[in-house]
Amino acid sequence: KNQVEQSPQSLIILEGKNCTLQCNYTVSPFSNLRWYKQDTGRGPVSLTIMTFSENTKSNGRYTATLDADTKQSSLHITASQLSDSASYICVVSPGNSNYQLIWGAGTKLIIKP
Amino acid sequence: SAVISQKPSRDICQRGTSLTIQCQVDSQVTMMFWYRQQPGQSLTLIATANQGSEATYESGFVIDKFPISRPNLTFSTLTVSNMSPEDSSIYLCGGWQNTEAFFGQGTRLTVV
């Protein structure tokens, strides 16, 4: 069964600190993996999208990694800011469907001053 | 990526009534979609909609309850019909542009 699991479920860190969010998936065949940021009550906003051949991709203070062999991804946030408080969702697209998205449950990140 | 304007942003509705949510995209998009997100949960796909054809609904969602229109390549509507408190949720529209899936800001619906 195609699944995406994220950990931790929630995380609280102090402003300025770094953190890493984890994503494991069992989706096969695999096409690409996306990380979205979703502020409370708002729509998801794309941070990164990685295909099978990409190991790392950065978007400002956000760096995503992908290990397609172990089917794991991580999202590293550097020098966190209060505005980083949001849910971060890992989403995987199967290789046999152009428009299907398999959603993780998300990690709720809270940045405290 | 494309920008979607979704409205209303929130509404409080009486049970038994219907609400139509509108999404306008600033560029032409072949496929649009509608998701529901219940409190504390991840997104659940309701249906996808191509211009000029019937929407394709996911298991658990039916056209009578969630009719969708897609009259052109930049616009779509979702109606939540005969609402009950269980329909209280955030409804999100979105679309595909190349390999990018982008979303509107969401409609927070409360049914009382």
Image (spheres, coloured by chain):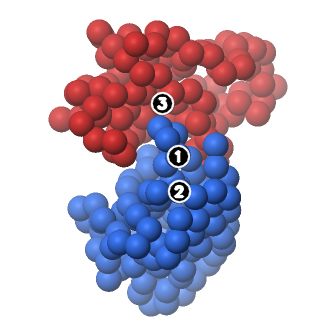
**Residue at left 67%, top 58%?**
B26
Question: Where's residue A8, x and y in %?
Answer: 47, 24
Crowding at dot 1, Cα within 10 Å, few <14 / some 14-19 / many 20+, comes out as some
Chain under numbered label 2: B
Find chain B in the image and tell me its colour: blue
Which residue does the numbered mark 3 point to in the structure image?
A34
- Name the mark nearer the viewer: 3 or 1: 1
Q: Are marks 3 and 2 on the same chain?
A: no
Find residue A32 and name its label.
none
Find residue B29 and name its label.
2
**Residue at left 42%, top 21%?**
A51
- Name the mark nearer the viewer: 3 or 2: 2
Query: Could you tell me which secondary element the residue under label 3 belongs to?
Result: strand
Confirm or deny contact between disc 2 and disc 1 (CB under 8 A).
Answer: yes
Crowding at dot 3, Cα within 10 Å, few <14 / some 14-19 / many 20+, comes out as many
Is A89 rendered above or below residue B51? Answer: above
Q: Tell me the amino acid under the disc marked 2.
A: Val
Pick whichever, A32 or B79, lies toward us.
A32
Q: Tell me the amino acid under the disc marked 3.
A: Arg
Chain under numbered label 1: B
Crowding at dot 2, Cα within 10 Å, few <14 / some 14-19 / many 20+, comes out as some
Q: Tell me the amino acid under the disc marked 1.
A: Gln
